Structures are given as structure tokens and as C-alpha cells.
Image (tube, rainbow, N blue to C red):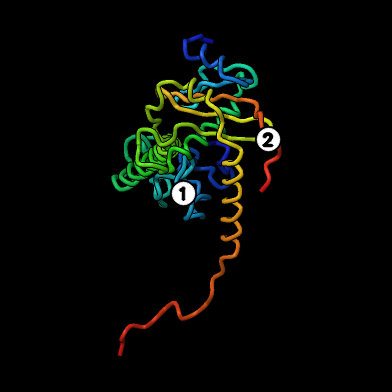
């Protein structure tokens, strides 16, 4: 029960409510809920002018804070579930999408692999064509001619 | 390593220095010679096959390509698909005069 976070000096009389009345986290309102977040924002042990007895804790939890606790728990649960599901879908779904299913292919792979390679002349032709294409692409320039945004007959 | 009739006939490919047989998900089923247990080459070839399958070079969707050739000066890789498996043969390149561009 997080006794290490208790401040025995200031909370001497409220030892039982210590874990619920620690106000340090409430100074940081933007913190995401986690296992250290207080689910009860205004617990009974914090109410001034009210004697605290150990009987108060198990039985007399006010209905409002109880609902808050429930919704906070649900929020944490959903958040955890969402992150877990997101990780699973992104890793497996992405992989499945990537792979293209293989076609039936040839009946005699050994024959296809054993035939002569494409001729050297064809390889040179492809290299030449690729070099021409690369040089053509490298010379493509954007030339500014007219405005990209043209107003249509707006009076 | 299983010796099926197809892998036995792969051994008879001329000028071959090694072969690979992969499943659809890239797992090596059989391998020999310079490609024996070459997972790295298998992974690279798998990606090349995946890219080649996406290119629409013809109208036949059943057979987007018959053979994928990766040709270097000294050697070459021949890749084909049969029965949902990928067959790779590494062969020496006889005509290894430098390719001029």
C-alpha cells in the first residue's frame, strides 16, 4: 500500500488514509491515469472536521467517488486494451498486407532454371535504356509559367 | 534435408554452384552449395520476388513472370515459382566480359 510515499510528519493523525490522501499527484492535473493515480479525488479521509476511524474505509465509501473510481478503472482498462490491440494489428496486419500471394507458376522449375540466360546483347540493351531513362529524368525541370491558383469568375 | 525428385533434378542445372527452395513465407525448405542455409540471400530474393509480382508486365495474372534473372559479371541468380514455392539457382556466368553502358 505505498507506504514509502507517505509523509509521516504531516499525516501523523491520518495514517490509515495516507495512501488516499497524498496530494502530490493532484498538483499535476495533466498526468495520465496509472497505477499510482488516485482514483478517489475527494476521499472521506480528507474531509476536515470529521473524526477518522478505521471503520470508515471498508463500509462508508461515498457513492460519487465510487463511480469515479469505476470510470477511471474502465478508462485504464480500455486504454490498455486499445494499446495492446493496436500493437497486434500493426505488426501482423502490416506483414500480411506486404506479401503478395505466389502464383501457381511453372510445372517444371528445374527446366526454367536450366535454360540459357538472356543474351549479353539484351543485358546491354537494358543497361543502355536504363541509362537513357536516368539521364532523361535527371534533366526534368519545373518551369514557372503561370499562377498555380487562378481565381474563377468571383465578382 | 529432404531429397524430392525436383531437388534431385535441380542438381543437374548446368553451371550451378548452389540452389535454394523457399516456401511462400520465405522459409528455406532445401538448399545446397554456395546457397546452403543462406537465409540472408533467401530474404533478399524473397523481397525481389515480391516486387516482381506487383509489376504488371503482361495480362497473365497466373504467371506475372516466368523467370527472374539477377545477372552479375561472374555469376547469376535464376528465380522461378512452382507450386507455391520459390526456386533459386545460382549459376556461374560464362560470358563474363564487363558490361559496358
Q: Quadrant of residue B89?
A: top right
In the displayed structure, would residue B8 be above or below residue A56?
above
A153 left or right, relative to B39: left
Residue identifier under label 1: A32
Which residue is drawn at the image coordinates 48% and 21% (left, top)?
Answer: A111
Is B21 in front, or is A153? Answer: B21
To which chain does the residue with label 2 belong?
B
In the displayed structure, would residue A139 be above or below residue A126?
below
Label 2: element kind: loop
**Residue A104 seen in this snapshot:** yes
Q: Which mark is residue A149?
A: none
B44 left or right, relative to A150: right
Residue identifier under label 2: B73
Viewer-side label of 2, 1: 2
Give the spatial CA distance, label 2 vs label 1: 60 Å
Across and down, in percent, residue B72 comes to 65, 35
Is B92 in front, or is A72? Answer: B92
Amino acid at each position: 500500500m505505498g507506504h514509502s510515499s507517505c509523509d509521516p510528519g504531516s499525516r501523523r493523525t491520518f495514517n490509515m488514509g495516507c495512501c488516499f490522501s497524498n496530494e502530490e499527484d493532484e498538483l499535476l492535473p495533466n498526468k495520465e491515469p496509472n497505477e499510482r493515480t488516485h482514483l478517489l479525488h475527494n476521499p472521506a479521509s480528507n474531509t476536515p472536521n470529521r473524526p477518522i476511524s478505521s471503520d470508515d474505509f471498508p463500509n462508508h465509501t461515498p457513492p460519487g467517488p465510487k463511480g469515479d473510481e469505476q470510470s477511471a478503472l474502465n478508462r485504464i482498462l480500455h486504454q490498455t486494451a486499445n494499446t495492446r490491440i493496436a500493437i497486434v494489428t500493426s505488426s501482423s496486419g502490416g506483414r500480411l498486407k506486404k506479401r503478395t500471394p505466389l502464383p501457381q507458376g511453372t510445372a517444371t522449375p528445374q527446366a526454367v532454371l536450366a535454360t540459357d540466360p538472356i543474351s549479353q546483347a539484351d543485358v546491354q540493351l537494358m543497361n543502355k535504356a536504363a541509362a537513357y531513362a536516368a539521364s532523361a529524368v535527371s534533366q526534368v525541370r519545373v518551369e514557372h509559367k503561370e499562377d498555380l491558383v487562378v481565381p474563377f469568375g468571383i465578382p | 534435408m529432404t531429397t524430392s525428385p525436383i531437388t534431385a533434378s535441380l542438381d543437374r542445372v548446368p553451371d550451378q554452384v548452389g540452389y535454394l527452395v523457399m516456401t511462400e513465407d520465405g522459409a528455406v525448405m532445401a538448399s545446397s552449395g554456395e546457397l546452403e542455409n543462406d537465409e540472408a540471400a533467401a530474404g533478399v530474393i524473397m523481397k525481389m520476388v515480391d516486387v516482381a509480382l506487383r509489376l504488371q508486365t503482361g495480362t497473365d495474372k497466373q504467371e506475372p513472370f516466368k523467370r527472374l534473372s539477377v545477372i552479375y559479371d561472374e555469376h547469376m541468380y535464376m528465380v522461378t515459382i512452382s507450386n507455391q514455392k520459390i526456386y533459386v539457382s545460382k549459376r556461374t556466368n560464362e560470358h563474363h566480359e564487363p558490361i559496358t553502358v
